[in-house]
Image (spheres, coloured by chain):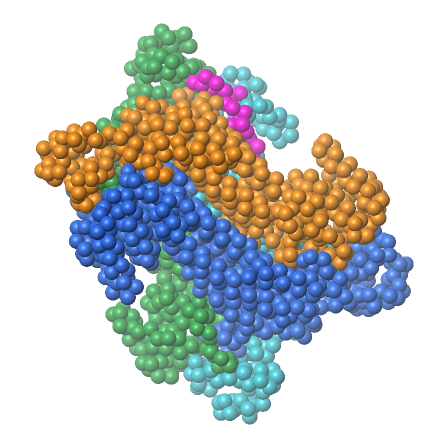
Chain colours: A green, B cyan, C blue, D orange
């Protein structure tokens, strides 16, 4: 059964049907489609378009169809071009021509937009739950290693000592922004297009606001032309997924590098490492590499949809059918990835000795400059003096703190014997207590705030 | 003057300098850089790092540098690798070594993030003003043509009659979502990274919250590692620009098609049309084509930045320097495009006769099916009957409303003489009064709501 | 069975397996995997690594596995993480531990690259066959309508008359370039990585050149590190697909616009049109809209892979597993789309009267300027004079050719009575006989050349 | 002066002019524009459209304009909307109305396509020269370190020992493919559109083939509609740039990681390192980070253009004006980047001791498995045995080669005293002599082939 065809002399070509049919992927919106149809049946009964009894029988029939879907007993038939057709076809098999009243005033254009928004609202909730689970894992590990020292890098070159808790918490805030964006995207998704018809609105006296509320939407759309072709919510969630994926890729990059034995800062648990078919000794951080690689895929899904939307004329165009697989793919990939990454974080072994061994004296050069600043040297000059001290140390093949004070005094007489005692990795970290700094106290405040934000 | 180099034996290669230097494009953040430095000077004075007098002299010097920038008299020097270096170099020329105290505890990593956020906040404000101006133009034209009839299309094929006001207002709501997104992106942009140092936070007792407030930020960042490398705000604004551009491209597509003489629904004003160097008669809708084409460019800028961010290790990496030109380009293009499009809308000539001539009787087929529905026929069956009526009309080479009722009754005995009087373009439109429908009353409610939202 | 794990204390987490396993999509390379293994077994026998008898038994076993795959009787088992594992596991079930000799010196890194290149070579052949079929359709329709006149547009505004054959042939040349690119991509794909091991090459005396030849490759790779991580061929085919898709989207845009009744230049066959669930009269050009929409998806697949490849360290990284689904998706979509589009072209009804009705006199303005040029007026001046004539005609509300010669002479005395006879749509077209011009003779030469290129 | 306007009642709006004008960026095609015009003047003289004397004066005038451009004395005027207008305007200032004959039969549509193709051909040549220079640098360094040992990684985890020459040469082959692609793209670029007019071809008897040859094109276009709107060459070069950029990003990633002191395998020369404004000790690999970051930008430029091209109707549309800045940007960035990277490679210090210290005994696990294979154990079984040996070594906290043979014999009795002598990093590498392997002899063959390919 097709929902159309009266005006046609010939049936569709088979190849066209294969190309055109969306049932292969939109069947996963069966729940939302039936949910929407149940609410719609009640709404058109309310509006007097069908009788209450008819609505009741339609709702009963739809519930039966849902049971078939949920139990896996629903059988697709040739001609079921999309989930809407399949459900209506089955409904009419179950309750007869009465089922044909359901579609009154409704088009697949507003129906599919409704289904897809409902699906997306749930997908956002699922993603946000995964984000929170990962945030919890980060907080726990940060708390447990709040004052461990590790090298901080910029440009992947030794910069300054930081604390492990600080490093881990940096990812918390990325995820926080992702969560905020998804929450706001959800609000823009929760706008009901139902009752927009094909493009011009409904000629029946449907209470669209009540219908929206019945389906869990926050409001209903204000312009039917826009409503049937608005895919902003898809683009926005795809963007949020892409940026979330980018954050995960950065965490992944750190863990991949830090788990190379040259660093050895972290060890992935056996359960989250994989081996090689050729090299028996291999322990590969596959989940982190997939996190990094999938960021590309998520970017591609976003790009593809935006390019598809570009230049479309008003109202619904079939091009919009390309929206679903992109979003399904982005959500599915994140939902497969995030639990594993969260488990990786939970089970991550941090190697304190390796991290401390990674600290080098030149990472205190800024503190040495600050030492001079506190003695009155303008920072720019202090920076230059210490730069020369660094070069001196390199020429002598010693660490920066091992250059004799006398030699330093040749660069600047303000260097004194108190220098060495005032410079240490722990002291460097401890001084950075302002909001957002790496000092354990500051990190504790971060963690406390993070916990409040989650609760 | 470089801000570094004490530890180096040799100066940078000239080619590297050309590659590395960002002064060519970041000089447009001169205002923000100086604004940030003034606030920073006061903050480190407050923290006791420099004296109040020193701060005062630094601020005086910075104001002088700003005057030079604003008057166009600032002269770039070799070695001014970025705006931060240029300003600090000039400051030291003006006030001597004291200028070297300004950078105490500050890195270009937190400085550039501060500058760029301040710049972006202003750019968002500018974009939002353009959006609002375009919304006003749409409302005005919609109000002026609230009940004019025009063909509504889906799949660019005749669908149902709609009103011109409804069509124009559909773009209002796209822009409304753009405005919402930008407003929320602005909140996430208004987070001060200043006081994060290079990556680890500041060792000085700076009141970062007060500093943030002094600069117009809403809050300050909570993690210095994140703060120096967070470019979410750039990605987010680039996305908002890309989606805004996509909306403009859809408006453009409509106007391009509707201004082809085969449609002739609209005429662009002479001032917003262009000609051909070869064909004397040409009137081309160049601004609309550029709107459509630039959507691609905006998508590219977004994609490029996301790909750049992908897989970066923690904290600042030089890759992030690629963020600015992308955002400048997206904002500049929209700021050049939008005033023209707004003027196009304001000056657009709508051709009522052409639009009405575009209405064809088959666009009332749905209303004909609804006619049967109101007589008790299930919609699906009514749809099929009317489909056959459409085919009949086509075979007879007449309009759908010109098929004799007797012939229709052969398809369904419920067709009666009242059919023709109940079917008209105006009636079709008038029935669609539910929220978001195309009826003039519904459009008036849209416009009223839109005006409230703008005020 | 996993192909690794001896060094691990604990098995992989279930979630990780779900994330990591590629069998869900790489099973479609079963043929290539087995083909590669058969050739490899013979190659290591040739190199003396295994005996000829062992090789024979392995080959027999592999052929049996292939039969199972081709008959659909192959059963996946838990632990079959990818197609390579599944085949090796089944082989060992069939022929015992001897099957474990097959992997000697081979890694999944070179194996998967081999499989995927073989798959891609076949996919390119399939795409090229589709391109040629579409080119044939275009030539046939162009030949059949070689001298029909239609309006030519630039900026979608009336420009000059052209011939239908010329318009249709313009797409032939786009496809020709696509075909060229794919042919060249195929040559770069036909480079055998087999024998590269995991990254360092094989320690066995395998004749890699002979092995490459046995598998239908044109040459073998020259650097094992590059060979296991080179995905240029994937990116290149994704690009070729994206650009091909862009060409199809342009054809689609023309047909979508030209099938709107305001133009009515073309009618899609019933078999390639679709209807609406709500509006009984609808005839939508769905395949063309999908062609346009899928161009976005193809762009997304390309972007995604490039972003994934960006910044990867040397040799194989798991990120590369993301390569397959992107290419499968692009090829599958084009293979579903192209036969339908070719059928659309073959069955396309061209409406001569509508096209001729679309011709307007102002489209001869350039010819009118050329008329003056032939009388000695510099073109720029002639252009300006005719521009004023166009304005005059518009003011008088008549066609350009209906402006009296006397009135034209006021603009330029060189206008004479021979003007009207020298200006006609047919004459305009007939004059454009230089290579690539729209005159029927020139189009015939195009077609003749096109036919030669195809044969 | 505008090249059009006769038909217009009002001049263009100022904002529209700012939006529309391309002179800001297309002026860099001045040379190509004038070159094209000189050839065109001669061609229309040859065709009898203008006299030989007129052509001579036009050519003289154009040469004068070129001199003004090259000397920097050319002055842009208001109204110079693009390079074509600017040149024609100046020409007419210099030689009077005669200059207005130049544009006969030519449109900016074929003119700009001609200019841009000529520009692109030169840009490709420049890029290819840079590629070759980098290939030479790689070969030289590979030759100089052909047999140095270093750890080879997959998944960034220790895999097998490789030679430095092998590692460096892996990038040679990536560049080789880039060069091949660019060469082929150049052939598709070298197709002359000149003589296609606005869309329909030229009505004058111009010898387009001779004109093409005069300008250095290999052939002329076969369809004028296609010719004026074909931007495949731009997309293709943008793709080639993006993939080239991706390769550079991979080299960059290796060098960034290897220059971290935890690895210390390479040291960038002082001239190609940069410092920090805050941290005096810093030595950052900025050029490599920019290489990595710019890959994103190059991907964005490609994506943007493809999205712009998507869905355009036939022939020229103004959207195409967006093509130039994207290609200029990609080429400019690569031309700024590549000389620096080549210099980085030339001046790169490789630290043999660090590389050798990075080799660990477990990287010989595959060789240990091969040892058993040579004694008759099926590889899969040998892999498992050695996996257990690796675990044993880890449990005992010793290197794999330090596990006593007796302990190994408990895993497999075929382990014998000859094990340790047959396993060494040098031996492992030396065995991989097949084509593409890491053995010094194989690398020498690579280098020899590479040199032949370059010469």
Q: Quadrant of residue A249?
A: top left
Spot occupied by residue C315 in the image (x, y as percentages of width and height): 35, 39
Residue positioned 67% across, 75% down in the render: C353
Total numbered labels:
0
Q: Relative to D118, is B186 on the left or the right?
A: left
Residue C235 versus residue A237: which sits nearer the camera? Answer: C235
Spot occupied by residue D190 in the image (x, y as percentages of width and height): 62, 47
Residue A92 versus residue C137: which sits nearer the camera? Answer: C137
Residue C251 versus residue C189: which sits nearer the camera? Answer: C189
Q: Relative to B21, is D28 on the left or the right?
A: right
Residue positioned 22% across, 31% down in the render: D423
Spot occupied by residue B228 in the image (x, y as percentages of width and height): 41, 34
Is there any visible trace of residue B28 in the rendered image? Answer: yes
Whether the magenta-drawn stretch holds residue B31 is answered as: no
Above or below B178: residue B260: below
Above or below B282: residue C341: below
Above or below A79: residue A330: above
Q: Quadrant of residue C5?
A: top left
The residue range painted magenta reads B1-25
Residue positioned 51% across, 61% down in the render: C131
Spot occupied by residue A316 in the image (x, y as percentages of width and height): 50, 66
Q: Main secondary structure of the magenta part?
A: loop
Q: Relative to A352, is A217 on the left or the right?
A: right
Is there any visible trace of residue A212 in the rendered image? Answer: no
């Amino acid at each position: 059964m097709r929902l159309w065809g009266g005006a046609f002399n010939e049936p569709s070509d088979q190849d066209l049907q294969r190309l055109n049919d969306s049932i292969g992927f939109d069947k996963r919106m069966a729940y939302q489609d039936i949910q929407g149809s149940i609410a719609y049946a009640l709404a058109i009964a309310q509006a007097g378009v069908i009788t209450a009894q008819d609505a009741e029988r339609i709702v009963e029939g739809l519930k039966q169809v849902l049971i078939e879907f949920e139990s896996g007993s629903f059988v697709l038939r040739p001609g079921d071009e999309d989930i809407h057709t399949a459900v209506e076809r089955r409904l009419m098999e179950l309750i007869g021509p009465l089922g044909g009243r359901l579609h009154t005033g409704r088009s697949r254009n507003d129906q599919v937009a409704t289904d897809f928004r409902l699906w997306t609202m749930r997908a956002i909730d699922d993603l946000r739950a995964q984000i929170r689970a990962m945030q919890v894992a980060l907080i726990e590990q940060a708390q447990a290693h709040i004052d461990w020292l590790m090298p901080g890098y910029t440009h992947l070159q030794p910069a300054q000592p930081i604390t492990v808790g600080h490093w881990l918490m940096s990812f918390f805030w990325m995820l926080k922004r992702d969560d905020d964006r998804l929450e706001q995207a959800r609000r823009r998704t929760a706008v009901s297009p139902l009752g927009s018809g094909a493009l011009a609105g409904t000629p029946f006296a449907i209470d669209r606001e009540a219908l929206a509320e019945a389906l869990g939407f926050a409001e209903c759309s204000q312009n039917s032309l826009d409503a049937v072709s608005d895919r902003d919510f898809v683009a926005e969630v795809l963007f949020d997924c892409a940026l979330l994926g980018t954050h995960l890729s950065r965490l992944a990059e750190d863990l991949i590098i830090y788990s190379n034995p040259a660093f050895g800062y972290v060890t992935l648990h056996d359960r989250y490492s994989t081996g090689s078919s050729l090299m028996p000794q291999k322990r590969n951080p596959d989940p982190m590499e997939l996190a990094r690689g999938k960021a590309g895929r998520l970017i591609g899904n976003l790009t593809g949809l935006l390019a598809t939307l570009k230049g479309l004329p008003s109202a619904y165009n079939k091009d919009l059918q390309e929206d679903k697989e992109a979003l399904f793919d982005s959500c599915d990939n994140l939902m497969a990835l995030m639990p594993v990454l969260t488990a990786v974080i939970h089970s991550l072994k941090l190697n304190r000795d390796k991290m401390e061994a990674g600290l080098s004296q030149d990472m205190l050069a800024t503190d040495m400059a600050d030492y001079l600043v506190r003695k009155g040297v303008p920072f720019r000059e202090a920076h230059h003096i210490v730069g020369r001290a660094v070069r001196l140390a390199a020429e002598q093949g010693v660490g920066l703190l091992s250059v004799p004070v006398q030699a330093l005094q040749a660069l600047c007489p303000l260097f004194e014997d108190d220098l060495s005692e005032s410079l240490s990795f722990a002291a460097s970290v401890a001084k950075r207590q302002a909001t957002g700094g790496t000092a354990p106290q500051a990190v504790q405040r971060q963690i406390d705030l993070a916990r409040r934000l989650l609760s």
